[in-house]
Amino acid sequence: MLIDTINKKKIKVYAFVGPSGTGKSYRAQMVASEKGINFIIDDGLLVDGNKIVAGESAKKAPTKIETVKHALFLNEEEQKEINNALKKYKPDSILILGTSDGMVAKIAKNLGLPEISETIYINDIATEQEMKTARKIRETQGKHVIPVPTFELKKDFSGYLLDPLQIFKSKGKGQKPYISEKSIIRPTFSYLGKFTISDTVFRQITEYLSTKTPEIYKVLKTRVENYGEGPIIYMEVMVVYGYNVMDGLKKFKDKARKEIEKLTSMNVVSIDVVAKSVYVPEKDKEEI
């Protein structure tokens, strides 16, 4: 499915080309910013600034062959999703990342975009040493960069290993720099075997945090259900009389979600905490 002729004429298409593992995704936003481009196509994703607006990362594919298919948008449904987003957002320009001139030209053709008007090559903006270091990290650690913040990826990459990568950028002379965050992931095909996290881990994290929460006297029951999008956690607790229970439990839930996602890189679907009983310190007894 191609985008309409009017939009095709308006969009200026740029390409950012370099061998796999040389740091293209790492530098994508810098290149786009210098050219005044807001939209980036990288490994199956359409990114607007720091937000994913369409597509699914090719890095989630189970094999390298499937990764290439996703990156090239060979599937008609994937083409349709990207084109619908292009119709909606009407970008003036777009930057396509690829490992060769032929690859970016193929992506543009599959999405019905105009021909590439300008190509930037990785060796024009990165030194040989920088590219060598990037390749070494890819080969030895299996890390890939996606040019969006980690919070944009949590749901789609629940259970993968993510690390935030903060880059200081300058707004200009005399102005304070700002931080642009990208995300590093290790795709499934870079592992030998399946990456899993035991439900016990979630239980231990939440129960430990409860000991640091004055409103909670003790945890009575914890149940964890883990599906594709991430864990669903249910807890029953004994609360301490005299505290604002609603506020205390809300703060506990927020902290638990934050810590679990920080420590495990898992997207937490939901956390429900139910006050089942009350502990009265001055009477040293429990009330149901």
Image (tube, helix red, strand yellow):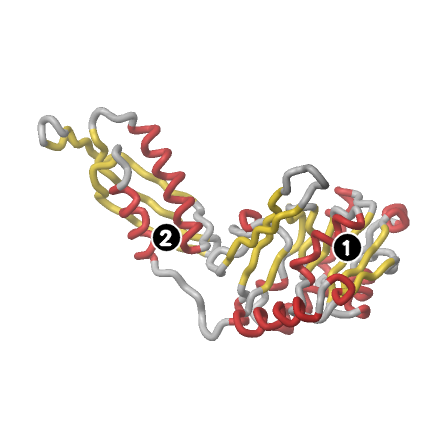
Mark 1: secondary structure: strand
| Vertical side of 157 occupied by 48: above or below | above
Which residue type carries mark 1?
Leu
| Vertical side of 99 occupied by 162: above or below | above
In the rendering, at what x and y percent does residue 276 appear? 23, 35
**Total number of numbered discs in the rendering:** 2
Q: Are marks 1 and 2 in contact (CB under 8 Å)?
A: no
In the rendering, at what x and y percent does residue 85 appear? 73, 47
Mark 2: secondary structure: strand
- Which quarter of the picture shows residue 76? bottom right
Which residue type carries mark 2?
Glu
Q: What residue appears at the point 21 percent right and 43 percent down from the top-left corner?
A: 220
Query: Horizontally, is 207 left or right of 47 in the view?
Result: left
Which residue is nearer to you in this view: 70 or 28?
Answer: 28
Q: What residue appears at the point 30 percent right and 49 percent down from the top-left corner?
A: 223
Name the image quarter holding the N terminus.
bottom right
Query: Horizontally, is 37 left or right of 181 in the view?
Result: right
Residue denoted by label 2: 225
Name the image quarter holding the C terminus.
top left
In the rendering, at what x and y percent does residue 198 appear? 35, 60
Residue denoted by label 1: 95
| Vertical side of 32 occupied by 102: above or below | below
- Which quarter of the picture shows residue 240? top left
Which residue is nearer to you in this view: 196 or 118?
Answer: 118
Q: Residues within 10 Å of mark 2 (few under 14, many from 20)?
A: few
| Vertical side of 101 occupied by 224: above or below | above
Q: Closer to the N terminus: mark 1 or mark 2?
A: 1
Q: CA distance from mark 1 to mark 2?
A: 41 Å
Q: Residues within 10 Å of mark 1 (few under 14, many from 20)?
A: many
Residue at the extreme front: 174
In the rendering, at what x and y percent does residue 165 appear? 56, 54
